[in-house]
Amino acid sequence: MKKTLTGIILLMSFMLSACGTAPTTPAPEQTTKVPATSTTVDVVSSATLARYRENEIRDYQGVRLDPAIGPADNSISGVQHVDLRNYRLTVDGLVGKPLDLSYDDVLNLTPVERLITLYCVTGWQATMLWRGVQLSELLDLASVDSEANTVIFHCADNYTTSMPLATIIDNKLIMAYQANGLPIPDEMGFPFIIVAEDKLGYKWARWVIRIELSADADYKGYWESRGFDNEADID
Ligand SMILES: Nc1nc2c(c(=O)[nH]1)N[C@H]1C(S)=C(S)[C@@H](COP(=O)(O)O)O[C@H]1N2
Ligand SMILES: [Mo]
């Protein structure tokens, strides 16, 4: 009896994990727009409209952008509010020159802008216009050691996630400080979010405070150590 109860509790807590569901790949057919009655369209759009911030860009080259504030927060410890006055970004681990950067130091690097969609395991998705820096520029500044093969992102809420160094370099991944023309809102990871293009939402580290270079290719972050796939490919 006691065992059954423990089992049920374990099962329930697992189901509540990572944006509220057990691991599944987002079903594209669920997210494709289907013709709806005008009432449905109105309800959906007014709820979404309410989440746009003042002066947020809503269209980019004919594509409708989603609000940078999502419909629900599923963060492990709630939304973080990072104070820039004592914010530092460190890049350390297997590097020749560890970095200790301010917010402005990062904004002074070469800006890149890209339209990229975030897919959460629940099927929720959001397409935004991201502006930030290419992670490889930061890594070059730190002179990464040749034995490093993994990049571990540490966040203000103690969340961690990682990606192979090669994925970051080959896919020219960026760390963003703007979404839809405005600073990243607290809800989306102010001051910095890793835009893990083509990877599931749990690779998109928010409120990044430390980028650690490692040789531990088997490192598992918060959700990865709880059963979510370490590759996290969207297809
Ligand atoms: N620091 C931190 N980053 C995080 C998370 C988190 O809990 N803490 N959650 C991840 C997950 S599971 C998703 S889907 C995206 C978006 O989270 P949201 O659904 O709460 O908006 O942020 C990712 N990055
Ligand atoms: Mo997620």
Image: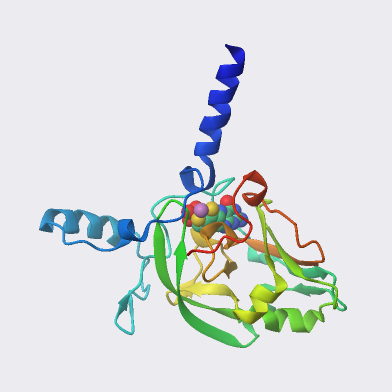
Residue closest to the far top: 1
Taking 31 as reference, is 8 above or below it?
A: above
Residue lying at 67% horizontally and 47% vertically, measured from the top left: 225
Give the image quadrant in which the ligand numbered 1 is located.
bottom right
* Residue 62 in the image: above or below residue 77: below
Residue placed most toward the observer, 176 or 233:
233
- Front-lying residue, 104 or 97: 97
Q: Which quadrant does the N terminus fall into?
A: top right
Residue 56 location, x and y as percent? Answer: 38, 72
- Residue 51 occupies quadrant: bottom left
User: Residue 94's quadrant in the figure?
Assistant: bottom right
Q: Where is residue 150, by image quadrant? A: bottom right
Q: How many marks?
A: 0
Q: Residue furthest right?
A: 96
Q: Closer to the camera, 145 or 38?
A: 145
Extreme front residue here? 235
Q: Residue furthest left?
A: 38
Q: Residue at x 24, y 56 (%)?
A: 44
Note whether residue 197 is visible.
yes
Q: Give the side of residue 44 with respect to residue 137, left or right.
A: left
What is the basis of the colouring in this image?
rainbow
Q: 183 left or right of 61?
A: right
- In x, y percent, where is residue 194? 59, 68
Whether 140 is drawn above or below 187: the answer is: below
> Can residue 80 be seen here?
no
Q: Is residue 92 above or below residue 113?
A: above
Instruction: Tell me the residue at 55%/47% (across/down).
Output: 78
Image coords of residue 17 (percent x, y) = 53, 42
